[in-house]
Amino acid sequence: MNVLDSERMADVLAPLGYSLSDTPDDADLVVLNTCHIREKATEKVYSELGRIKALKTARAEAGETMLIAVAGCVAQAEGAEIMRRQSAVDLVIGPQSYHRLPELIARTHRAGGERLAADFEAAAKFDALPKDRNARGVTAFLTVQEGCDRFCTFCVVPYTRGAEVSRPAEAIASEARGLAAKGVREITLLGQNVNAWNGEGARGLAGLIRQLATIPGLARIRYATSHPADMDDALIAAHGEVSALMPYLHLPVQAGSDRVLRAMNRAHTADSYIRTIEKVRAARPDIAISGDFIVGFPGESEADFEATLALVKEVGYASAFSFKYSRRPGTPAAALPGQVDEAVKGERLARLQALLESQQRAFNAHQVGRTCPILLEKPGRLPGQFIGRSPYLQSVHCDAELSQIGKIIPVEITASGHNSLSGRILEMA
Ligand code: 5AD
Ligand code: SF4
């Protein structure tokens, strides 16, 4: 979502004459879009700001100006603190306020204006953003929902992104049609809790996907990120029935121990999660399952952690993201007893990642010798080489031609690695 937010900020600034710069060195405006989910991400903001401040000083010495804006969830959560700790920051803007960037920049130029915008009105933002989006390639993100009402005890999202808001189906469809008209073939519907989408004009996310699947030119639809307890039967059925809906599901479980899941306020058990995966696989047997994991949640014992390993073995993941628990001030879990030692977290994470990586390699290796429809996205690093995506969200390298970008082409997979596949195009499309 931050990638999309950055693109949208560039879009709202374009009418003011701003265009993207390759490096911050010669920028008139640097927008640092930030993530607050784990402590490490937050700390990076302050070190990055130190570096940007040096660039600003260098520009000032050359008689040029540079505005520094901090956007995103760190801005939302720690706006006043950022301005106190780093005086070079000109403005701070939360994720629901970036449609106001042009106005805030104008005020900053007039000096003494409002420097902190951290409103919570997602709906106002969507209404204010330009309707006509710039397409930046053949795949695009599209926000359908923002915020989260689930309040997992470790997570800052409900506090930084606010309550769940679903955009109306018509607004989403119109944005999707606009993107398709500009050559976008694949959209990923985004939301912090996307499968809880309950906007006007369609019945749940499944109904929305069925509507979007009828848009001419749009060949592929994905969505992220989902909560297991919001995975309803209609959405599961759509995986078996809507051919544009890609066989890939990112469904975070976080942990495999019911005791830990309860303390996390996850509203599902290991068993209910596994049953959901079984239902999804019954609807779409080849689906790639991906997940998020946290190790070292307060109170997690070795036995609890082993339950996570057991769950991973039972599910069989195609890809995954895993993290050491990071204590976030203000969240309920930060105050829990039994905080786990960093060294123990590190050791558990290494064991979990070794298992997940072996599963990912096996999933990738399974494609070798098969033919896959690949959406060709962009040129690769080597001459003649292009990068595309498989239905299972794997990157695929193959030799192709520029004119084939945006086409979905049968590719025979010849080799696989941890993070990508290589193949050869079967027919010239
Ligand atoms: N510590 C570690 N990981 C976290 N996540 C969210 N909050 C925390 C935290 N405090 C992870 C979860 C979530 C992903 C986006 O980030 O796994 O699914
Ligand atoms: Fe955070 Fe996801 Fe839980 Fe919402 S469902 S509180 S975004 S981890």
Image: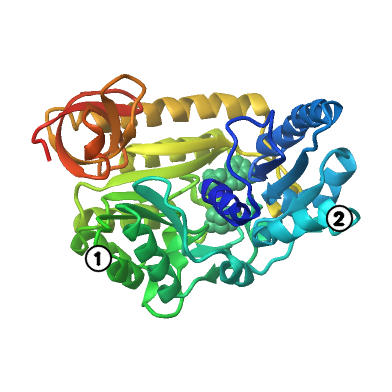
Name the quadrant where ligand 2 sits: bottom right
User: Residue 89 vs residue 272: left or right?
Assistant: right
Q: Which residue is mark 1?
A: 237
* Percent position of residue 103, x then y: 74, 61
Residue in the image at 24% along x and 65% along y: 237
Residue in the image at 46% along x and 35% along y: 306
Residue in the image at 8% along x and 36% along y: 427
Residue in the image at 70% along x and 33% along y: 44
* Percent position of residue 322, x then y: 50, 36
Question: Quadrant location of the C terminus?
Answer: top left
Which type of secondary structure does the marked residue at label 1 adopt? helix
In the image, 346 versus 32, the foreground residue is 32
Q: Which mark is residue 269?
A: none
The answer, for residue 357, to whether it is visible in the render is yes
Q: Which residue is mark 2?
A: 110
Q: Amino acid at mark 2?
A: Arg
Q: Amino acid at mark 1?
A: Ala
Which type of secondary structure does the marked residue at label 2 adopt? helix
